[in-house]
Image (cartoon, grey):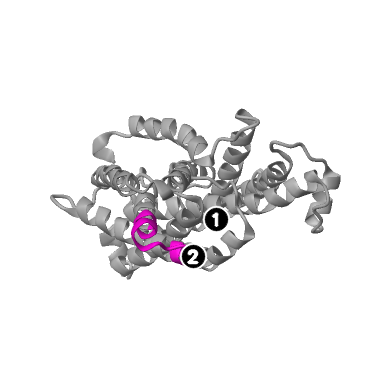
Amino acid sequence: MIARSPKLSPRRPLSARSNRARGLWLFGLAAALAGLCALSITIGTRDVDWVDISAALAGRADTIGQAAVTMRIPRTLLALIAGAALGLAGSVMQGVTRNPLADPGILGVNMGASLAVVVAVAWFDISSNEAYIWTAILGAGCSAAFVYTIGSLGRGGATPLKLALAGAATSVAFASMVIAVVLPRNDIAGGIRSWQIGGVGGATFERIVPVLPFLAAGFLISLLSARKLNSLALGDDLAAGLGERVALARGVAALGAILLCGATTAVCGPIGFLGLVVPHLCRLLVGVDYRWLLPFSALGGACLLLAADVIGRIVARPAELDVGIVTALIGAPFFIAIVRRQRVREL
């Protein structure tokens, strides 16, 4: 009698199962984003119902409720695109520097853009949206280059710890310079201080439209850099051995992040910690493959900034907390937790 071999049940390859799980998480994030957009439109100082929302979406503003919704729509759109830009930029920066603490705020990029805008306003009287955007992008690029150069000095090159320290010192120095520039100018001090906090209140389509081409270019460059970032994650020597031009790959990916940071800072002000928190949370969901991590970081950043904006409207009613304050309250403990979990020599 011949014994039958047990019937083997076919199993899906591990990669197929993980991609299915990632797809489900992606769908869940998209659904959460849609829900947060709805909350952002409905929640505020004045309660509105769906009749006001549908009328406002149709272009009507006959009642106070409809007018309130009309003002919240561009605010919601700005929070969505700014959050996506900062989340994606943070993920790209962590990949470029191989630094778990990389963030547009921690590395001084946002503050560099902020300083450039403040100097341009105080000394050169710029006023157009396009001038704000170009100035912020130039400041962000110069600050990133400066921090990377300082962090590269000495033995070991640009280690994550040295980059984090150089970025923190640069941020403090630039913040002091901003105060020094604004202090003698009482005519612009109020507006600059409000902008420095970082927020999406008072958004209009007139402010959003000029920044869209820069954000679109930043999104495109960053997302197309996913495979190169996967190569850089293996180390410079191995990436070069695989045929990757390391300096070019790092420079192109950094350009995408700088465009995103500079354009977002120009329209919203410097918003910190979002680019640090979101990539770490997304890695828990999808792993370290940048082909998945980058789009997840964009969606996660949009969700987090929209949630922070809604929370800021609720906790201080009838006033509001700017999103820059809420993200700092969320991000600072997260930053401390990452530092405590990582050994300094492993950074």
For the residues labelled 2 and 1, the Cα–Cα distance comes to 32 Å
Q: Amino acid at mark 1?
A: Pro
Give the structural element (helix, strand or loop) at label 1.
helix
Q: Residue at x 55, y 66 (%)?
A: 210
Q: In the image, is residue 209 part of the stretch drawn in magenta?
A: no
Of the pair 55 and 290, the residue shown nearer to us: 55
Q: Amino acid at mark 2?
A: Ser
Mark number, residue 128? 2
Judge from the rendering whether residue 70 lies leftward or rightward of residue 142; answer left or right: right
| Coordinates of residue 218 in the picture (x, y in percent) | 48, 64
Mark 1 Cα shell of 10 Å, populated few (<14), some (14-19), many (≥20): many
Q: Quadrant of residue 313?
A: top right
Q: Is residue 203 above or below residue 239?
A: above
Give the magenta range: 117-133
Q: Earlier in the sequence, mark 2 or mark 1?
A: 2
| Coordinates of residue 10 in the picture (x, y in percent) | 65, 50
| Coordinates of residue 19 in the picture (x, y in percent) | 59, 53
Q: Which residue is mark 1?
A: 295
Of the pair 131 and 237, the residue shown nearer to us: 131
Q: Residue at x 56, y 42 (%)?
A: 304
Mark number, residue 168? none
Res 7 visible = no
